[in-house]
Image: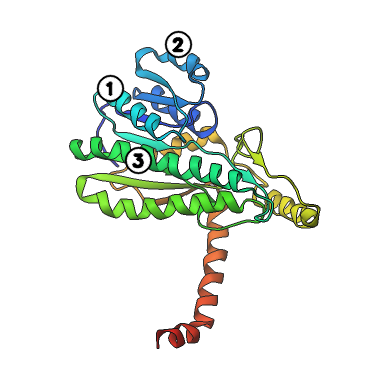
Amino acid sequence: MSTANAARIWFITGTSRGFGREWAIAALQRGDSVAATARDAASLDDLVAEYGDRVLALTLDVTDRAACFAAVERARRHFGRLDIVVNNAGYGQFGMIEEISEDEFRAQIETNVFGAFWVTQAALPIMREQGSGHLLQVSSIGGISAFQNIGAYNASKWALEGFSQALAQEVAAFGIHVTIIEPGGFSTDWGGSSAKHARSLPAYDGVRDAAAESRKARVSSPGDPNASAKAVMEIVDAAEPPLRVFFGDAPLQIAEADYSSRLDTWRSWQHVAHLAQG
């Protein structure tokens, strides 16, 4: 664990509720400063009232590239540096692949992938110049596995995972760490008012019911967002933080079953791989 006690500067997207808000509060409670973004900065008024100039509340729609760069630069000018950048803003798009419109699919990618991509690109020059920094990319167990009725969401998180793993290799020499956080089900609003739903096709009603039952089984005991803040602090305090980390009890079991199945399939079809090799 790092023994450094110096207060750090955070930049967190999606701080109006859920993980982003819990982590912002935890950072502030331990004496750090936070550039907190939300679509409506007024949702952060209580944090500003309690923590004063250690909170920079910024209105940000992460689907706006120019706004992402401007927000990151404003945070740098305000605090002088950026130590921890958390790409948390996002939402869940529900719908079978056949049901999802092009606009819905594009909107999911714009928010969950490009939003994180632009904030990351904006922060990297600052961190390179400092010779330090830590990017936390909020993915999901749905970023390494996939589940019916959230295929668009899975696609967005798989993309986030891919560019973040490549990024970690690219920036390690500059003293920059990357951690991909992969939560299971938590008591946040992810599946509630923040979620979006495609227009249903009756043909999928039975599949949809099965998907709902499967999700209930996966999220039978949702995690505590407040406890997740303690986990985040352990990650950012680590001298060598992980590239990937699960949040919650369920993801490891899901991953073990999924990856075991993949390996079994690849091995059983290895003769075709050799055939293709020529």
Q: Nearest the camera: 207 or 52? A: 207
* Quadrant assignment, res 10: top left
Give the alpha-carbon distance from disc 1 to disc 2, as whole Å: 18 Å
Q: Nearer the viewer, mark 2 or mark 3?
A: 3
User: Who's the residue at 46% across and 34% down the image?
Assistant: 229
User: Who's the residue at 36% across and 50% down the image?
Assistant: 242
| Residue type, mark 3 in image | Thr
- Taking the image as shown, residue 233 lies to the left or right of residue 142, namely left
Question: Which numbered circle lies on residue 120?
Answer: 3
Query: For mark 2, does the 10 Å Cα neighbourhood hold few (<14), some (14 to 19), or many (20 or more) residues?
Result: few
| Residue type, mark 2 in image | Ala
Image coordinates for residue 155, horizontal then vertical, percent:
53, 53
Give the quarter of the figure containing the N terminus: top left
Give the quarter of the figure containing the C terminus: bottom left
| Residue type, mark 1 in image | Phe
Q: Identify whether 78 is placed above or below 63.
A: above
Give the alpha-carbon distance from disc 2 to disc 3, as whole Å: 29 Å
Q: Are marks 1 and 2 in contact (CB under 8 Å)?
A: no
Q: Nearest the camera: 13 or 181? A: 13
User: Who's the residue at 57% across and 59% down the image?
Assistant: 254
The answer to which of marks 3 and 1 sits earlier in the sequence is 1
Query: For mark 3, does the 10 Å Cα neighbourhood hold few (<14), some (14 to 19), or many (20 or more) residues?
Result: many
Q: Identify whether 194 is placed above or below 46.
A: below
Q: Which residue is mark 1?
A: 79
Q: Are marks 3 and 1 in contact (CB under 8 Å)?
A: no
Q: Which residue is mark 2?
A: 49
The answer to which of marks 1 and 2 sits earlier in the sequence is 2
SS at mark 3 in the image: helix
User: Who's the residue at 60% across and 35% down the image?
Assistant: 188
